[in-house]
Amino acid sequence: MQKKYVVRLTDAEREIVNGLVKKRRVSAQKVLRARVLLKTDADGPNWTDMEIANAFDCRTKTIENIRERFVTEGFENTLNGKPKSRVRGKILDGDQEARIIAVRLGPPPQGFANWTLRLLAEQAVALEIVESVSHATLRGTLKKTISRKGRSRIGSFHRKPMPSSPRVWRKCSMSTPGPTMLGIRCCAWMSSRCSY
């Protein structure tokens, strides 16, 4: 069957693809696309879609999509995938974040013992700090303000420190008897010999 989208790599493109296949730290998707481009090259091996799919353990539709993308969108888009179109901007600027943190550090409204994220979001809208804000956005903002241990404790959530273990763990050769351990009468993490 005649292929609708025929891949013809230039020498420079072939060098880039060969380099990607040989690199160690490249994403698996990128390596697969590079290998498919090498095998579908009309001036190279020119394998069929079924042969490539069997060799690389993928579907023939994947091979067809890679060939189509190469012809329609170009080499870079085929190799790197589609560029991310959804870019999120910052919801709160620095001044708004500072004012929300200041509100959080103040006393909670009448009838409440502590600030909740939803209450803080409602208060930020009521004080006209922002037009609208989600409690999840405030969670991320307040989480950024948590200081390291030993500094001031600004922020909404505080993690309790892990209890430190004052005991030094020691393992003695007699506690784990085995054929290789019987003749040894010393501890693994002690410099002196065990006394029994």
Image (cartoon, rainbow, N blue to C red):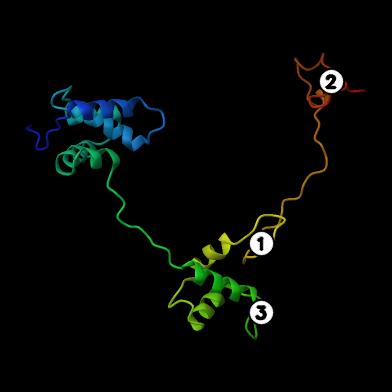
- Circle 2: element type: loop
Pointer 1 with pointer 2, Cβ within 8 A: no
Q: What residue is shown at x 64% (from left), y 79% (from top)?
A: 108
Label 3 and label 1: CA atoms lie apart by 18 Å
Can you say which quadrant of the picture contains the N terminus?
top left
Residue closest to the eye, 27 or 1: 27
Q: Which residue extends farthest bottom?
A: 110
Q: What residue is shown at x 39% (from left), y 62% (from top)?
A: 89
Q: Which residue extends farthest right?
A: 196
Please give left or right for residue 153 compared with residue 9 in the image: right
Label 2 and label 3: CA atoms lie apart by 61 Å
Number of other residues with Cα within 10 Å of mark 2, as a class: few under 14, some 14 to 19, many 20 or more: some
Residue closest to the eye, 87 or 151: 151
Judge depth for marks 1 and 2 and give the one in front. Answer: 1
The spot of residue 196 in percent (x, y) is 93, 23
Q: What residue is shown at x 20% (from left), y 41% (from top)?
A: 65
Choose top left, top right, bottom left or bottom right for residue 21. top left
The amino acid type of the residue labelled 3 equals Pro
The amino acid type of the residue labelled 2 equals Cys
Choose top left, top right, bottom left or bottom right for residue 139. bottom right
Q: Is residue 111 above or below residue 17?
A: below
Judge depth for marks 2 and 3 and give the one in front. Answer: 3
Question: Label for residue 186?
Answer: 2
What residue did someone put label 1 on?
A: 158
- Circle 3: element type: loop
Q: Is residue 192 above or below residue 75?
A: above
The spot of residue 80 in percent (x, y) is 29, 40
The spot of residue 146 in percent (x, y) is 62, 60
Q: What residue is shown at x 51% (from left), y 78% (from top)?
A: 124
Question: Label for residue 107?
Answer: 3
- Circle 1: element type: loop
Q: Earlier in the sequence, mark 1 or mark 2?
A: 1
